Image (spheres, grey):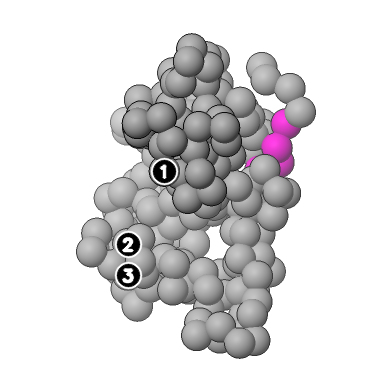
Amino acid sequence: MGKVITFRTEDVRAIIDGKKTATRIIIKPQPTYHYFLLGRITDSTGDKKRIGCAAWGPSEEDVAEYAKIPYEVGDILWVREKWTELDKQIHYAADGCPDIDRYDPFGKPLDGRKIKWKSPICMPRDFARIFLGVESVSAGRLQDITEEGAKAEGFIGDAISPAGKHARSWFRNKWDEDYWEKGFPWDRNPWVWVIEFERLDLPF
């Protein structure tokens, strides 16, 4: 079955176009701000459930907090995305409005029906069309992202945009749009999982 990962519609488009090969996920619970990332637990004389977790602490000799790593290198992920079922066929929001004969270019129904997109959370595994192979998993601070890292997230530079000419600036603006109200703004510099992947040609 593989593991699941959920993407927004714009991210799905970027994956399909080959522009997005990485994503960042908030680590929960967040490690204490001033703690150091100590690495991965490979052995434990206490709780065996800690083995495989990432660890943080105030010093190299003092492990204080743990977080379970969500994915492993080699994992196969199936992508949940916004979708709907129309006339017994599955359609995806990333592809635009289905059936152009019944919808104008702005998505307005021409026959009185309205597209009701369903949340990615409700998407069954059997409807998945995009599969990803995990190539790298690491933990880091959000602001550690480089220009190349922002491009791998699917962003490009634009010299005339309000965000500035750097892909990293675009990434920052979009991040704050999504996470400011959730308590994880750019300026807080939260810990994140950095997942790098490649799109697979065939489902598994």
Say whether disc 2 or disc 1 marks the residue closer to the N-terminus. 1
Helix, strand or loop under label 1: loop
How many labels were placed on the picture? 3
Give the side of residue 47 with respect to residue 17, left or right.
left
Residue labelled with disc 2: 179
Marks 2 & 3, CB-CB < 8 Å contact: yes
Specify the principal SS of the magenta part: strand
Residue labelled with disc 3: 185
Indicate whether 180 appears above or below 100: below
Q: CA distance from mark 2 to mark 3?
A: 6 Å
Amino acid type at circle 2 is Tyr
Residue closer to the observer: 91 or 109: 109
Residue at x 61% of width, y 26% of height: 129
Task: Farthest residue to the front: give it.
Answer: 111
As drawn, the label of residue 82 is none
Say whether disc 2 or disc 3 marks the residue closer to the N-terminus. 2
Foreground disc of the pair 3, 1: 1
Residue at x 61% of width, y 74% of height: 167
Residue at x 76% of width, y 28% of height: 201
Amino acid type at circle 3 is Pro
Query: Residue 76: x and y, percent?
Result: 62, 27
Query: Residue 37: x and y, percent?
Result: 45, 60
Question: Does residue 168 appear in the picture of this structure?
Answer: yes
As drawn, the label of residue 108 is 1
Say whether disc 3 or disc 1 marks the residue closer to the N-terminus. 1
Give the magenta range.
Answer: 195-200
Foreground disc of the pair 2, 1: 1
Amino acid type at circle 1 is Lys
